Amino acid sequence: MVAFSGTDPRNAVLANSEVIRGLGRLLVNDGTTNKLETTDSGDICIGVSAGESSRDADHAFETSAATVSYFPLGGVLMVQAKANTGTDGVFTTGCTVYVGANGLATATAGSDKKLGIYVGEGHTTGTSLLATANDSTETEGELIPVMTAGAAIA
């Protein structure tokens, strides 16, 4: 399965100190700076990262005026899911997927906005997130397919 289908990526500037380490992170527009950042619980997601954010000449992630490519919501997108702690990472075909903290999708509603419908086979994410390849303390989640055409915008 391809990671994304039916849409072309867009480019955006990230908020200062924001780093995206891979594809599938949920992004929101920071209305104060008009720059993108990873979602927090309750945010309205506008897109999903298409890869990692920009790096400097020494291959370190840029933390000021960094850029990232992202796919706007609409259609099936592969998104990073939260690790399973209880029911956070239990996805059944057709279940509602919500926008969670740290740019990760969750199966738990809470105050989170709807991201879309899970369209994969039944899946439970691991109990810990996947480690990144760049020796960072940050972590990335497992990718799951979500039909994002019905995302909440309010």
Image (cartoon, rainbow, N blue to C red):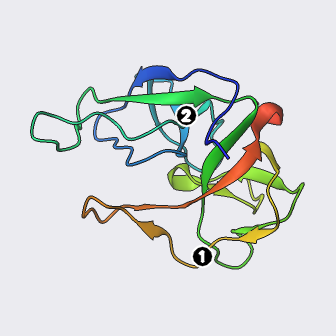
Quick check: 154 above or below 2?
Answer: above
- For the image, the number of numbered tags is 2
Element under label 2? Answer: strand
The residue at the point 62 percent across, 40 percent down is 43
Where residue 20 appears, x then y in whole percent?
A: 39, 44
Judged from this view, the residue extending furthest toward the left is 58
Whichever of callouts 2 and 1 sits on the residue coming sooner in the sequence is 2
Quick check: 37 above or below 139?
Answer: above
Where residue 4 appears, x then y in whole percent?
A: 63, 36
Q: In which quarter of the image is residue 91?
A: bottom right
Task: Decide if residue 132 is on the left or right side of residue 25.
Answer: left
Q: What residue type is labelled 1?
A: Gly
Task: Decide if residue 140 is on the left or right side of residue 78.
Answer: left
Q: For residue 101, say whether it is visible.
A: yes
The residue at the point 52 percent across, 76 percent down is 128
Q: For residue 114, say whether it is visible.
A: no
Judged from this view, the residue extending furthest toward the right is 94
Where residue 129 appears, x then y in whole percent?
A: 50, 70
Q: Name the residue under label 2.
A: 28
Pick the quarter of the image with the C terminus: top right
- Give whichever of 33, 146 is nearer the camera: 146
Task: Decide if residue 99 is on the left or right side of residue 19.
Answer: right
The residue at the point 29 percent across, 30 percent down is 66
Q: CA–CA distance between discs 2 and 1?
A: 25 Å
Q: Residues within 10 Å of mark 2 (few under 14, many from 20)?
A: many
Quick check: 72 above or below 50?
Answer: above
Q: Quadrant of residue 51?
A: top left
Q: Mark 1 points at which residue?
A: 126
Point out the frontmost of discs 2 and 1: 1
Q: Which amino acid does label 2 sit on?
A: Val
- Give whichever of 64, 126 is nearer the camera: 126
The residue at the point 54 percent across, 44 percent down is 39
